[in-house]
Image: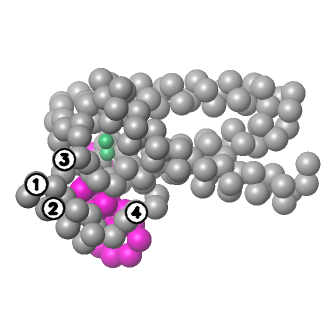
């Protein structure tokens, strides 16, 4: 494989994973998978939450892809792309937005601020239904999200 192909595969998988994460979050985690995800929408004291089992599940799948990728190279690079997305997600979602491990990094402007606000608004809804902003890196405009939330309350 050429370097350009490898790079395209990694970048492509990162983009794909954002779409995949959106769909999984909306239809699985807030659907039949709510049992695990619920812990992420409720206050808790422990360092871990049941929702982390999703991260563990995806990690196991990715390890499987790396192993299979030893025999078929494109799979290995695709697995790397998924890992890159997972790394960004852990860094931004867990460390920046939710300040796990005691970090304090609050962006004041730009794209990161928008991302933070969009995800906070996802958490504004405590239950399984009627949430907004299921994506992550592609963050919708917080003003629009707030309007959407306000409309739902009125209903
Ligand atoms: Zn959620
Ligand atoms: Zn969250």
Q: Earlier in the sequence, mark 1 or mark 4?
A: 4
Task: Tell me the quadrant of ligand 1.
Answer: top left
> Circle 3 is placed at which residue position?
125
Q: Residues within 10 Å of mark 4 (few under 14, many from 20)?
A: some
The kind of secondary structure element at disc 1 is loop
The residue located at (25%, 55%) in the rendering is 120
- Between disc 2 and disc 3, the foreground one is 2
Residue displayed at 18% across by 30% down: 45
Q: Residue furthest bottom?
A: 109
Q: Are marks 2 and 1 in contact (CB under 8 Å)?
A: yes
Read off the residue under disc 1: 155
Mark 2 residue element: helix
Within 10 Å of disc 1 (Cα), the crowding (few <14, some 14-19, many 20+) is few
Camera-side residue of 88 and 118: 118
The crowding category of the residue bearing disc 3, from other C-alpha atoms within 10 Å (few below 14, some 14 to 19, many at least 20), is: some
> Within 10 Å of the Cα at label 2, are there few (<14), some (14-19), or many (20+) other Cα atoms?
few
Circles 3 and 4: CB distance less than 8 Å? no
């Amino acid at each position: 494989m050429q370097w350009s192909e490898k790079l395209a595969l990694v970048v492509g998988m990162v983009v794909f994973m954002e779409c995949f994460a959106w769909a999984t979050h909306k239809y699985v985690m807030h659907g039949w998978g709510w049992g695990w995800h619920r812990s992420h929408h409720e206050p808790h004291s422990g360092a871990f939450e049941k929702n982390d089992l999703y991260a563990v599940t995806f990690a196991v799948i990715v390890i499987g892809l790396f192993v299979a990728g030893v025999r078929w190279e494109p799979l290995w690079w695709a697995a790397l792309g998924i890992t890159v997305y997972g790394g960004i997600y852990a860094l931004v979602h867990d460390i920046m937005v939710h300040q796990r491990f005691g970090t304090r990094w609050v962006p004041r402007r730009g794209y990161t601020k928008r991302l933070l606000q969009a995800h906070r608004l996802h958490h504004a809804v405590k239950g399984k239904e009627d949430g907004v902003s299921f994506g992550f890196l592609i963050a919708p405009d917080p003003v629009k999200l707030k309007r959407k939330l306000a409309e739902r309350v009125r209903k």
